[in-house]
Structure formats: C-alpha cells, structure tokens
Amino acid sequence: MSVIVRRTVWVTLLSGAVGLAMLPMAQTQWAEDTRASASRGHGEGAGEGEAPPRAMMLVLPFVKVGVLMGVPALVVLGAGAAVRRLRR
C-alpha cells in the first residue's frame, strides 16, 4: 500500500474516532440551549418570521460538513505531527 493511501486511511479512521468521541457533547445543556434558540429563530440577523437569505441556505450545509469533518481531521493531523516530533 502506498504511503499516501495508508496516511489517508489512518486520518479517516482516527478522525472518525475523534468525531465519535465528541458525540456526547450533543447531550450537554449547552447543545440543548443552542438547539432551542435555533428553533426559535433567534440567530443573528434574523427578524421575527424572516427567512434567511437563499445564498446562506445553499452554503451553510457545506460549511457544516466541512467543520464537522475538518475539525477531527485537523486534530488527528496535529496529534500525528506531535508524535513524529516526539520520536525524533
């Protein structure tokens, strides 16, 4: 297996593990408050009964996926860099 494929598999598996480890945060009071305020439409810039702009509705799902997949991947890459530094 090439080095690139092996590293990609490791980052994918470990970022998935970090994502699963972060899953209990969904049960915290902070998450409940965030969901409750979002369901009431109290986001920034949104008035009473005002729909968010269409451009935002198109872009935000991609931002959400990027953040939810990118943060664990960056944590794994940072941990890998730290391990490599400690080995030297």
Image (cartoon, helix red, strand yellow):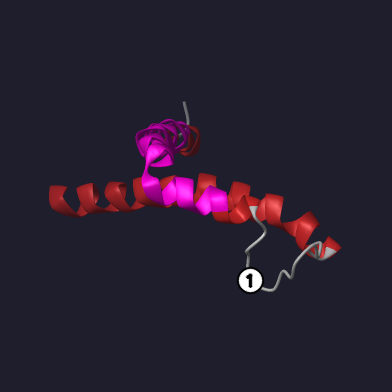
Q: Is residue 71 visible?
A: yes
The image quarter containing residue 23 is top left
Q: Which residues are magenta?
A: 9-36
For this orientation, the residue located farthest to the top is 1
Residue drawn where x is 85% and y is 61% of the image? 54
Q: Is residue 73 visible?
A: no
Residue drawn where x is 21% and y is 47% of the image? 83
The image quarter containing residue 63 is bottom right
For this orientation, the residue located farthest to the bottom is 45
The x and y percentages for residue 85 are: 19, 55
Residue drawn where x is 48% and y is 39% of the image? 4
Q: In the image, is 39 to the left or to the right of 4?
A: right
In this view, the residue in front, 7 or 14, is 14
In this view, the residue in front, 47 or 10, is 47
The image quarter containing residue 38 is bottom right
57 within the magenta span: no
For the residue marked with disc 1, what is the amino acid? Answer: Glu
Residue drawn where x is 29% and y is 52% of the image? 81
Q: In the image, is 79 to the left or to the right of 86?
A: right
Residue at the disc numbered 1: 44
Q: In the image, is 52 to the left or to the right of 34?
A: right
The x and y percentages for residue 2 are: 47, 32
The local crowd at label 1, few if under 14, some if 14 to 19, many if 20 or more residues have their Cα within 10 Å, is few
10 within the magenta span: yes
The secondary structure that most of the magenta stretch takes on is helix
In the image, residue 1 sits, relative to residue 80, either above or below, namely above
The x and y percentages for residue 41 are: 67, 59
